[in-house]
Amino acid sequence: MFLNHLVLQSNNKKICILVSSLGKGGAERSTGQLSIMLHELGYDVHVVIILNHVDFEYRGTLLNLGDLKDKDDTLSGKWSRYLMLKRFIKAHNFDWIIDNRSRVNVFKEVFFQKFILKSERKIFVVRSFKLDVYFPKPRWFINVLFSKNAQIVAVSSGIKTEIERVFNFKHIDVIYNPIAENTFLPSIHETQSYILFYGRLDDGVKNISLLLEAYKLSELSNNHIHLMIMGEGKDKAYLKKKVLDLGLDGYVIFKTFVSNPLPIVAQAKYVCLTSRLEGFPRVLLESLSVGVPVVSVDCKSGPNEIIIDGFNGLLVENFNAKAISYAMNRFIFDKPLYETCKKNAKRSVEKFSIKKITNDWKQLLEKM
């Protein structure tokens, strides 16, 4: 095993990881990876999912409440699931509950935290700079939901700083998303030369419209370099229409979501990210880990903790299509710059190795 040097002797410590699902998102992929890391450390891991999506690998026992939701989503069915979860938490008497869910409904959260998740040993993970997703409004209600001694894990330093500024919590640790060590890349047969965006097609967050506008302004299509957009989401039809409106039909390729994107990532010239905000974007880590440089806007938060401008990628002012198109062109026409960033890509993310991040989780759990 890749973590044998860290494996604890059987200590019977039990961990519950609570997440919306194990499918189609960076937070969900990271949660699956977290279950694997903790399992490799010797903990008795249980994963609870609310929705019936399982695309990513995980370890431990799975309680799939989503399967029950699909069978009976009536009010009585929902109440039965709540009671099942409450009994599950009580029966196992977990040493830690790691809550990876988004938490947007204040009344639902009061019910969850005070009735279902009554354990004092909870860890709240925050995976986005958009704090409203994890700390529901109204702000004055936060003290009812979370004590000042609540243990919080932020996936970037930028998120930690913002939580401290807004809420003045004291116990916040930064534990980054790791990159997996498995770099086996099956061959694929893409004939086009392309740059790549991949992720959830949610334009309100990922701002793929900005990427399309920058691509339109760039010289890439004139040089037979396509833009591939890989993923699924609510704005796929809207983005396809925007491609037509911009006259980019034939230059922009839409590809469906795949659970292992790395073979396609590895053949891209570079990967682009133009989000309005992030947490700690896995797409940048994954791309660099397979030797592919990146062009990213300097959004909050994460990219400036991953990218060293001109060393492993290009960091660009956000919401500026001209600046992004200029960066796109640089990576095509400035060969020495591109080769430098490509050469440095893999070693630039060694500090986010699964070995290092697993040890960070181990130290936090032991501290608690």
Image: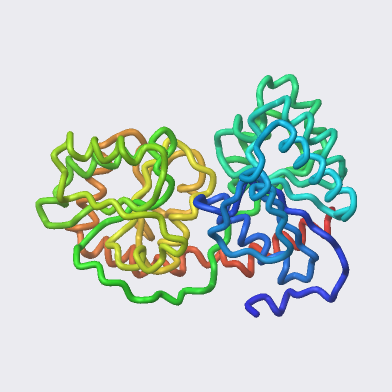
The answer to whether residue 181 is above or below residue 105 is below
Residue 322 visible in the snapshot: no
Badge count:
0
Q: Position of residue 286 (x, y in %)?
A: 45, 61
Most foreground residue, 95 or 128? 95
The answer to whether residue 137 is above or below residue 90 is above
Query: Looking at the image, which residue is at 17% across and 50% down?
Result: 251
Give the side of residue 207 with respect to residue 352, left or right: left
Q: Position of residue 136 (x, y in %)?
A: 66, 27
Most foreground residue, 49 or 1? 49
Give the side of residue 67 with respect to residue 92, left or right: left
The quarter of the image holding the N terminus is bottom right
Query: Looking at the image, which residue is at 53% across and 64% down?
Result: 179
Q: Position of residue 268 (x, y in %)?
A: 29, 63
The residue positioned farthest toward the left in the image shown: 222
Give the side of residue 48 with respect to residue 257, left or right: right
Query: Looking at the image, which residue is at 56% across and 40% down?
Result: 128
Q: Quadrant of residue 135?
A: top right
Q: Quadrant of residue 334?
A: bottom left
Q: Position of residue 297 (x, y in %)?
A: 38, 43
Residue 15 visible in the snapshot: yes
Query: Looking at the image, which residue is at 72% across and 65% down?
Result: 60
